Image (cartoon, rainbow, N blue to C red):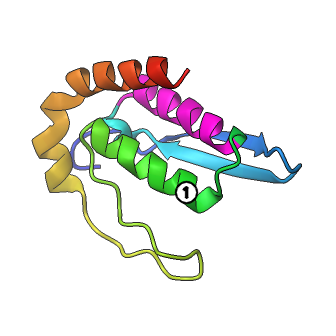
Amino acid sequence: NEQGLPKALCFENLRLPDGTKIRFQVAIGLSGGSVESADKILRLCYMKFMTGASKLEVEQYRASLYELVGSTAPPLPAEHGEKKQKTSGSEANKANKSRTLGATDELLERLKKEG
């Protein structure tokens, strides 16, 4: 990894309210390189699933949280059947690396507001 950011993931095997089991993951590198931020994003996504949101809705929500911490997530397809476009977020990650700490504070505030 060019920026030295971990490529590791935080993931959870979730059981949705309808009984379906899914694996959902959050990339640490897209979470500003912070394991703490990735874990918080994962918890926010879990709460979104528990309100009945679809996987696509939660993926879009996760992308908005990545933006909040200053990383650029690859664009999501309109439907699951479409292929995701591959993009390099390395330049965006380099430009936003210094904002990680402030963005983590914003994420904490959002987490507090959403319960």
Q: Residues within 10 Å of mark 1 (few under 14, many from 20)?
A: some
Relative height, residue 34 to residue 73 (above, below) = above
The residue positioned 35% from the left and 72% from the top of the image is 86
Q: Amino acid at mark 1?
A: Glu
In screen coordinates, is 25 left or right of 8?
A: right
* Frontmost residue, 59 versus 100: 59
In the image, taking residue 76 as reference, residue 52 lies left or right, namely: right
In reply to whether residue 112 is colored magenta, the answer given is no
State the image coordinates of residue 81 (x, y, percent, origin top left). Answer: 59, 82
Residue at the image point whose x is 63% and y is 34% from the top:
47
Name which quarter of the figure residue 73 lies in: bottom left
Horizontal and vertical percent for residue 75?
Answer: 36, 66
Q: Nearer the viewer, residue 76 or 11?
A: 76
Q: Give x and y (percent) for residue 105.
A: 30, 18
State which region is magenta: 34-49
Q: Secondary structure at mark 1?
A: helix
Q: Disc 1 designates what residue?
A: 57
Across and down, in percent, residue 82 comes to 52, 82
101 shown above or below 74: above
Residue farthest right in this picture: 19
Q: Residue drawn 46% across and 47% down?
A: 62
